Amino acid sequence: MGGFYTASGRPGKLIFLLSFLPPFPILSILYTRLNGGIMNKGSLLIHNGHELDPATGALGVTVYQTSTFYRKDMTGKQTQEFDYSRGGNPTRKALEETIAILEGGAKGYAFGSGMAAISSVIGLLATGDHIIAPQDIYGGSWVIMDTFYKRWGLELTLVDTADPENIRKAIKPNTKALYLESPSNPLLKITDLKACLGIAREAGLLSIVDNTFMTPYLQRPIELGADVVVHSATKFLGGHSDVISGLAVTKTAELGQRLYAVQNSFGAVPGPWDTWLVIRGIKTLKVRLETQQATAKRVAEWLLTHKNVTNVYYPGLENHPGAEVHRSQSSGPGAMLSFKTKTTEQALNFYSRIKLAAAAPSLGGVESIASYPVKMSHVAMAPAERERLGITDTLVRIAIGLEDADDLIADFDQALS
């Protein structure tokens, strides 16, 4: 654990005392209350207990590039925290503690990808359990629930979670979990998380929220009532399109122990170097997201005026159906937007003509990325179902990067004209 050092370079009294305290939630409280006040989220991204290496004072987390650790005692009388990196690694622990603090949860866990995190959380359920999820859920999440876990007896019902009552109506005697996204992918539909999570709590359901689009900098689902939060850390948290990783945070330590058993058994964990890349990315999350969402709002407002654009989906627009609900549960509209062109040809031409946005899957990097949902994130979904949900051949999804807003607008204009 990093902390405060004396002039000699030795740990100061504060870090010495902290070393005897359990990490959660006391560590979160200590680090968020500084000098009698609450530390702002931007500061917490950097000062969360892992800003210094306690052994050397280095301004960064050490990469423990090892698979195994020396066993000090073979009698079983003494315990040691690390013995094999599938079960735990100091670099991974730093990331796991960091994301737990940022989300306001009890325990954090790192995985080899966002889908590994989601799959492991769904692994908490049992054969015959029923889960409710949004009808416009991310394609990968839908596939794992409706194919892999369906083979093991999981029942899935998709509903329009924009109306919380649809969730209440879908609850059955064997319903055990509610899975939510807000904003949704790729139509940026808004779900009233507090209302929906309240319904889950009343029914005794495990509630899971994918917070990839918003990150804990803009939205904290555990504060709204969620039991588990999942992330594709590949996206905004990593932030540089150079790492594949996933994260999950549990509200309670007891639930965390159950998830750790799944994590350790599945073994879908990231390597130390990938873990370090996410730790590095988190430190710049504030400046990236603040810039990206400011640009996204300008681009979305401009798209509304374009003659070849019929619909624009962005929660930062006043005409967005969920704008008011989104403002009540998030501190910003984020950097994701989608729009529809008049014809399929115009959409395909846009992808072939853009120069400042990469036509590619994924999102959240420093470069803008234009994705084609019908051929990328939702390709596994039946065409008729995609069409019913509004995920059409004319839909373009944009993850805004760090390019200048004027340059992006000029580039998008020539690609759409």
Image (cartoon, rainbow, N blue to C red):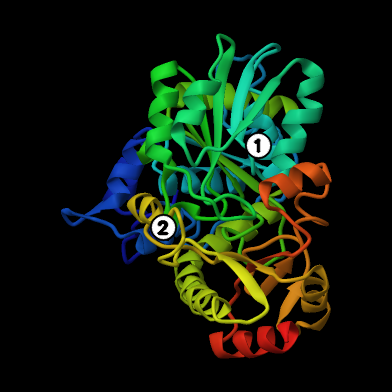
Q: Position of residue 87 (x, y in %)?
A: 67, 31
* Residue shown at 60% from the left, 66% from the top: 311
* Residue shown at 55% from the left, 23% from the top: 177
Q: Nearer the viewer, residue 250 or 2?
A: 250
Query: Is residue 276 shown above or below 413?
Result: above
Query: Is residue 405 shown above or below 311?
Result: below
User: Is residue 303 visible to us here?
Assistant: yes
Question: Which amino acid type is marked by label 1?
Answer: Ile
Q: Which residue is mark 1?
A: 118
Query: Is residue 186 shown above or below 289?
Result: above
Q: Which residue is mark 2?
A: 323
Label 1, label 2: how far apart the Cα atoms are: 27 Å
Q: Position of residue 246 (x, y in %)?
A: 65, 46
Q: How many marks?
A: 2
Q: Secondary structure at mark 2?
A: helix
Image quadrant in which you'd find residue 264: top right
* Residue shown at 56% from the left, 17% from the top: 176
* Residue shown at 44% from the left, 53% from the top: 322
User: Is residue 106 visible to us here?
Assistant: no
